[in-house]
Amino acid sequence: MIVTIDGPAGAGKSSAARQLARRLGFSFLDTGAMYRAVALAGQRQGVDWGDPRQLSAVAEAMRLELTDDRVVMDGQDVTAAIRTLEITTLTQHAADNEAVRRHLIDRQRKFAEGRNIVTEGRDQATVVFPHAECKIFLTASEDERARRRFHDLLARGEEVDPAEVLRKQRLRDQRDAERKFGGLAKAADSIEIITDGLTPDQVVDRLEEIVRGVQPDGSPPRNCGP
Ligand code: DC
């Protein structure tokens, strides 16, 4: 079974999707981490960001292992290195690069072969797994998302200005929404959850209730059809 969780930055997708996968005994796939790893590899190898072919070559050559809570690139643990503000900004080059996207989509589909997964990103329901049995769109208000991101960065020891976090988030939202191929969009058959005012546990409870309600033939959940 494939459960897709898409939504904008800061909606709380990663931690909710990871927890959900644990509760269900499914594998967890963080597709944002894949785009981030490509950006990090590009930065380390000094690619020319103006030449998209250089970054796609880096993506194809990169060895990447994703486990439930670690990201290992070419044998090195990069779990923390891919989450800095600098890499977050550079990741747009990977996300906007169509050849990189096609390549990562192949890797995502291979990852799903023969397993139950919870996968998280922007285009999982619309492009990568249009036949997924259960599709969720997780979102929150702009202010709430920026507030969470600010606290996340602080907890990681990065010095940030809340107004700057909000400004960058707006830019990312706009780029994510306008991207021609794989842009952020809610699939018609996704169930939307707005996480403002919900604790992380309440979000996971809600997700679990939805997934467990999905019928074996993939028809919508009993309790909360779209
Ligand atoms: O979810 P995240 O913040 O880790 O994602 C990092 C960037 O990658 C973000 O700008 C959107 C992009 N992304 C994407 O284009 N497609 C995905 N499936 C996942 C992430």
Image (cartoon, helix red, strand yellow):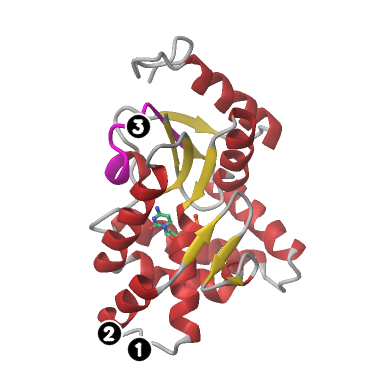
Q: Which residue is outermost to the front?
A: 114
Nearest the camera: 2 or 161?
A: 2
Q: Which mark is residue 196?
A: none
- Circle 2: residue type: Asp
Q: Write down the region rendered in magenta.
A: 126-137
Q: Earlier in the sequence, mark 2 or mark 3?
A: 2
Nearest the camera: 191 or 175?
A: 191
Nearest the camera: 75 or 163?
A: 75
For the point 56% across and 72% down, the residue is: 75
Q: Is residue 143 above or below residue 205?
A: below
Q: Which residue is mark 3?
A: 132
- Circle 3: residue type: Ala
Question: Where residue 129 sits in the image (x, y, percent)?
Answer: 32, 40
Check disc 1 and report its element: helix, strand or loop. loop
- Circle 1: residue type: Asp
Question: Where residue 162 sits in the image (x, y, percent)?
Answer: 65, 64
Q: Which residue is mark 2?
A: 51
Residue 123 is left or right of residue 207, and the answer is: left
Image quadrant in which the N terminus is located: top left
